[in-house]
Amino acid sequence: MDLELNEVAVSAAGKRLIEDVGLRVPSGGLVGLVGPNGSGKSSTLRCVYRTLRPERGSIRLGGRELAAMSLRESARLTAALTQESQAEFDFTVTEVVEMGLTPHRGSEADRGGYDPAGALRAVDCEHLAERGFLTLSGGEKQRVLIARALVQRPELLVLDEPTNHLDIRHQLEVLSLVRRLGITTLTALHDLNLAAAWCDHVHVLSRGRVVAGGPPSEVLTPETVGAVFGVRAHVVEHPETNAPQLLFAPAETTKK
Ligand SMILES: Nc1ncnc2c1ncn2[C@@H]1O[C@H](COP(=O)(O)OP(=O)(O)OP(=O)(O)O)[C@@H](O)[C@H]1O
């Protein structure tokens, strides 16, 4: 199911958070949102998982206006891992993962996919099934929340910094898993090299606007990264994967 945003604008507390945001995630595609702190990544994602209501523009999922769907319907289709998801649940890990089934309760629909144990296995957390969620490390919590998103069997995954708190192995495993799942995914990422390595397309946000979008090799150029993030970047090619990777230096550093 594809996702399309056109000229989306949203405000909160009298402040324009994003303006004219447009992007498309093709069915089964993985698209990254990158940008400096406060550039509007989370606000864009919040419009997609409907905790913010755009005041202009359109958001279509599978060709249908989100605004015309009931919240229950869009919640069934969309699983979100948000900045707020780390809420303090006083439940076991299995109970937290089972919460992902909530949007399907009372519905006949069963599109197959992960059961709670399978989802925990997929994120390498099977051994944590009976632990209290509150006793987990930050990275373990993050992986359990990804398992909760998987059992929902969503058509669309919306991920806000899914690699937060994860060690390097689990960062790579989570993105590789998302890739393998083939679910339409829009994700905010701080790490430009992860975005470059895993995303089909990357959109760069700056002050609430998309200033560049397309394949990572076309978008994550020294010029764009320099202008948006205020750092000097050099692009090298990963010797194994050929993905563009960036090396950074502060803007003011002069070469010795
Ligand atoms: N409810 C709100 N009321 C007022 N301002 C808000 C609200 N939500 C977000 N903002 C502001 O909008 C801007 C964009 O925030 P947003 O969280 O979308 O950025 P972000 O790119 O996800 O940032 P980060 O990388 O720091 O997570 C910020 O300046 C933020 O302070």
Image (tube, rainbow, N blue to C red):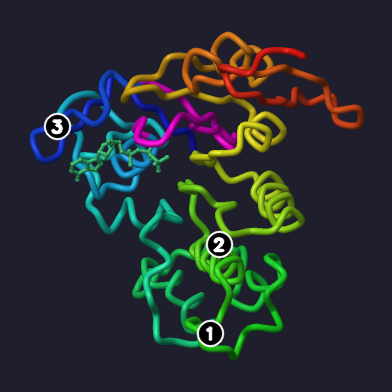
Name which quarter of the figure residue 59 lies in: top left
Whether tag 1 and tag 3 are in contact, CB under 8 A, the answer is: no
Q: Which mark is residue 146?
A: 2
In this figure, which residue is indicated by the disc labeled 3? 15
Left or right of 125 in this view: 63: left
> Is 180 colored magenta in this rendering?
no
Residue 235 or 80: which is nearer the viewer?
A: 235
**Percent x, y of residue 152:** 48, 64
For the image shown, how many numbered marks are present on the structure?
A: 3
Residue 115, placed above or below residue 2:
below
User: What is the C-alpha distance between the residues marked 3 and 2?
Assistant: 31 Å
User: What is the C-alpha distance between the residues marked 2 and 1?
Assistant: 17 Å
Name which quarter of the figure residue 190 lies in: top right
Name the element at disc 1. helix
Question: Going from the N terminus, do you reach mark 3 or mark 2 first?
Answer: 3
Residue 193 or 115: which is nearer the viewer?
A: 193
Give the extent of the magenta segment: 22-40
Residue at 39% x, 22% y is: 206
The residue lying furthest to the right in this view is 240
